[in-house]
Image (cartoon, rainbow, N blue to C red):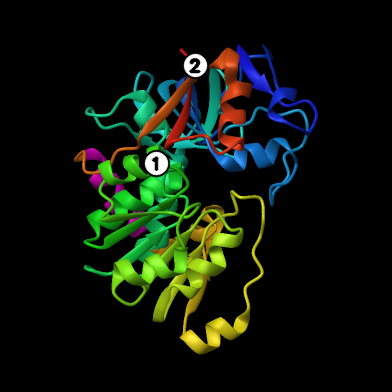
Amino acid sequence: MRALVCRRYGEPEDLEVTELPEPEAGPGEVLVGVRAAAVNFPDVLVVADKYQVPSPLPFVPGSELSGEVLATGEGVSHLKPGDRIFGVCSTGAFAERAVLDAGQVATMPDTAGFAEAAAFGVTYRTAYHALRSVAGVRPDDWVVVLGAAGGVGLAAVDVSRELGARVVAVASDRDKLALCIRRGADAVIDYAREGLKERVRELTGGGAHVVIDPVGGAAAEQALRATRWGGTFVTIGFASGTIPKIPLNLVLLKGVTIKGLELRTFGVHRPDLESRDHGELLDLFAAGRVRPHIGATFPLADGAAALRHVADRRAHGKVVIEVR
């Protein structure tokens, strides 16, 4: 089978498409014929060996995919060959075949395409847990979303809308801001041209109830300063490449709660909330209430270019590698 392989840590351009042996499903696993795989910013970090959990060389990057079940391992009874599925894995998605834990696989809604299903899981689970369970967003809350035109950002705009909140989308150019408006944001801020703190306070009539930050960098402190007293700031990643250093006096003076969400371990610590959120989110997906925006697609042969597109923060919504 063809696969995009990382043989040495480095840049996306160091990846190569090559032939690998066909994998087999073991007990509790499913073998999937991959139709589409989504690129996430952590994939870039994994290839560079800068992620929290290293992947031993060589490996096939990619953590979420969609496709058809080809075979099931011992003990798997809820899936059968031919089922259209989507799911997540630690690595291995950027290939023609992949083996997944059957517990990390869901059947695709009839209304969804393979690209949509592949692009749904990681970003929407992150956004839903952050807003529903970590921040506890309520109807009419003002939610400020940093990096709002990215995969997690647009998912946060969608989920905030479904929870009845009002959204201020923050991004860096007019095309991205226009996309956020089309996706349901109530207001937008171009942080490259406007003062983030002042505009948030002006638009929300006193400050944000919740800030969702997948970006980090200089905007994080300004967004924290733009919260109202008693607000909640949720950090979920550092796509800017810079981990901010927050002055704790701001937390003291504003009574702000700062929380973090790591998708990989959320279910380990709060399996009750993970289960509830997962069920609610799948219902929304099946009903067509939430759908990822696919901003760019690449063939497997150009998989390295897909990762570069995400690494350079040029993605509008999700980037998908179409395998076949």
Q: Position of residue 49 (x, y in %)?
A: 75, 41
Q: Quadrant of residue 94?
A: top right
| Residue at the outermost bottom position | 253
| Residue at the outermost right position | 8
Q: Quadrant of residue 47?
A: top right
Give the alpha-carbon distance from disc 1 to disc 2, as whole Å: 32 Å
The front one of 99 and 117 is 117
Classify mark 1: helix, strand or loop: helix
- Image disc number at residue 323: 2
For the point 55% across and 39% down, which residue is it?
313
The front one of 1 and 73 is 1
The vertical placement of 294 against 125, above or below, is above
Amino acid type, residue under disc 2 in the picture: Val
Residue 282 covered by magenta stretch: yes
Please, what is the dominant secondary structure of the magenta stretch? helix
Q: How many marks?
A: 2
**The residue stretch that appears in magenta:** 274-286
The answer to whether mark 1 and mark 2 are in CB contact below 8 A is: no
Q: Position of residue 292 (x, y in %)?
A: 35, 37
Q: Badge 2, how many Cα within 10 Å: few under 14, some, many 20+?
A: many
Q: Identify the residue position indicated by label 1 in the image.
A: 174
The front one of 175 and 89 is 175
Using the rendered image of the protein, determine whether residue 274 is visible from the camera's viewpoint.
no
Instruction: Name the front one of labels 1 and 2.
Output: 1
Q: Position of residue 315 (x, y in %)?
A: 49, 35
Amino acid type, residue under disc 1 in the picture: Arg
The vertical placement of 272 against 307, above or below, is below
The front one of 227 and 173 is 173
